[in-house]
Amino acid sequence: MITTGSITEIRGYLKKERENGRTVGLVPTMGYLHEGHLSLMRRAREECDYVVISIFVNPKQFGPAEDFDRYPRDPERDKAMAEEAGADVMFAPGVEDMYPAGFSTYVYVKGPVARGLCAASRPNHFRGVTTVCAKLFDIVQPDKAYFGQKDFQQTIVVKKVVKDLDIPLEIVMCPIVREPDGLAMSSRNVYLNAEERKAATVLYRSLKEAEQSIANGLMDTKEILDDIEAAIADEPLVELEYASICDTTNLNELDSIDREAVIALAVKIGKTRLIDNVIVNSEIEK
Amino acid sequence: MITTGSITEIRGYLKKERENGRTVGLVPTMGYLHEGHLSLMRRAREECDYVVISIFVNPKQFGPAEDFDRYPRDPERDKAMAEEAGADVMFAPGVEDMYPAGFSTYVYVKGPVARGLCAASRPNHFRGVTTVCAKLFDIVQPDKAYFGQKDFQQTIVVKKVVKDLDIPLEIVMCPIVREPDGLAMSSRNVYLNAEERKAATVLYRSLKEAEQSIANGLMDTKEILDDIEAAIADEPLVELEYASICDTTNLNELDSIDREAVIALAVKIGKTRLIDNVIVNSEIEK
């Protein structure tokens, strides 16, 4: 596996691959890899001839009071894991490579997909995500890019950018990978102490209960959300940021589970913000 | 010459050309072609194997009180002229092709290059320009794209997007083409009646006088601008919107002509808005 932080260098490698007619898969990450990231890489490995993983803790998607500085980083471990998962290139640029002095262009999505859910508490977060993704797509020009369902809103927002700007690539959303007790894999799980880690299982527990209620015929989203909120209120360490049930295609809130829907949660546990979601009433899930 | 409004179709043509290793030049226009556009096409024809001209009156770069509806259009004449100038494809999408229902992604530049000059009176103009250019660049994926110096700020703003987002293409800025009496070619010149058309020559006249003063050693931009304003004030039909002298690289206003500078003008003549500029103190100009 080649490792580079240089835009010029990675373009050189990719040019050669494309001249040989090989397809390119991109897995954009912020590093500190876990099984979720590895599942994306394995999928890319299956579907594409040449697999690029990018590792970039993107300052533009963090708010001023957020955890950019303390976000966990371990380049050597990431490198070993990416190589093991079959990546061909690890692209790990520095902040000065991606945002040289005077950088001032942004890509953003207006409207509901980038307004509710996580956008409410993280006002410029998705603008940071879509800007860095636009750059990565222009640098790598992949045929497919792989995102995890854990960041469901992010995936929908990035899909919207790709569609609206006619970027010639396919966004592939891969299922959430979970710990044995159901906690969704996240680089931020490392922030949790033992007690918080235990409390964190309430996210998936409450989502599973909601899933079960829906399977039993409960369709009223207000009632479903009341149950989730009650479950979370029972965990004194966990503070709910939002629980929401939305149309998966446009993230409009639903009154009733009358189409494919995402039940999405964000909580704070101590200083750690965690998110999780499940998709319900989906043909894909059956 | 092939004519199409379909994104899928033009992608098909371009894929074949690129597979044969041919370079692609794009000339983005709003149609109603004149000698200025033709000069861009001829330059593209010289430098690239395959030349695409796009014709799209982009609603997103017009303000609500501006001339989108009455902007001159003549597809048949454009087609004949583009073919004559050697274009291989004319890409003429409809508004619904470029902005289907629900479109909501924008590309914009923050900061001085997209703030002063034309941006002051046209607040969302450059956001419309950069959004449509990002789309055209993603659709055509040209090696080079050609813009006219007449829209100097536009060219600088688009260059900024290309640099900041790592779009792999070169922006080529071509000299202004003028009528025999000096008026810069513009599709909007057709709006002028005989009297207005005569008065419009004051733009280039005042710019030439400024150029001459600078050649004679006048370096104080305030004095230069006073002379331009006085010349325009002498034309009762012409209302000055701005006269400004800026660093060509970042469009910061200059106190003194101590580096390459652009002298840029915008005026209203009746309901018609016209712009013009000259570059001074440039190595390129010598």
Image: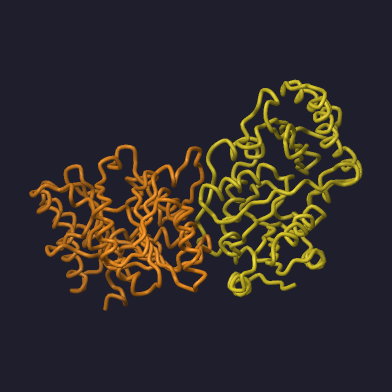
Chain colours: A orange, B yellow
* A70 over A17 or under it: above or below: above
Residue nearer the viewer, B168 or A132: B168
Quarter placement of the C terminus of chain B: top right
* Residue B167 visible here: yes
Residue nearer the viewer, B118 or B39: B39
Q: Position of residue A66 (x, y in %)?
A: 29, 41
Residue nearer the viewer, B30 or B69: B30
* B238 over B17 or under it: above or below: above
* Residue B9 visible here: no
* A62 over B217 or under it: above or below: below
Residue nearer the viewer, B164 or A164: B164
What is the quadrant of residue B59 in the picture?
bottom right
Viewed as shown, does residue A256 lie left or right of B93? Answer: left
Q: Where is residue B261 in the image (x, y as percent from the top left)?
A: 69, 33
- Determine the residue positioned at 31% across, 76% down: A284
* A244 over A61 or under it: above or below: below
Q: Where is residue B196 in the image (x, y as percent from the top left)?
A: 87, 41
What is the quadrant of residue B241 in the picture?
top right
Viewed as shown, does residue A197 lie left or right of B69? Answer: left
- Determine the residue positioned at 31% across, 66% down: A41
Viewed as shown, does residue B224 lie left or right of A229? Answer: right
Q: How many labels does the image show?
A: 0
Quarter placement of the N terminus of chain B: bottom right
What is the quadrant of residue B76 in the picture?
bottom right
Q: Where is residue A102 in the image (x, y as percent from the top left)?
A: 51, 38
Viewed as shown, does residue B244 lie left or right of A129? Answer: right
- Determine the residue positioned at 57% across, 53% down: B131
Residue located farthest toward the left when viewing the structure as drawn: A195
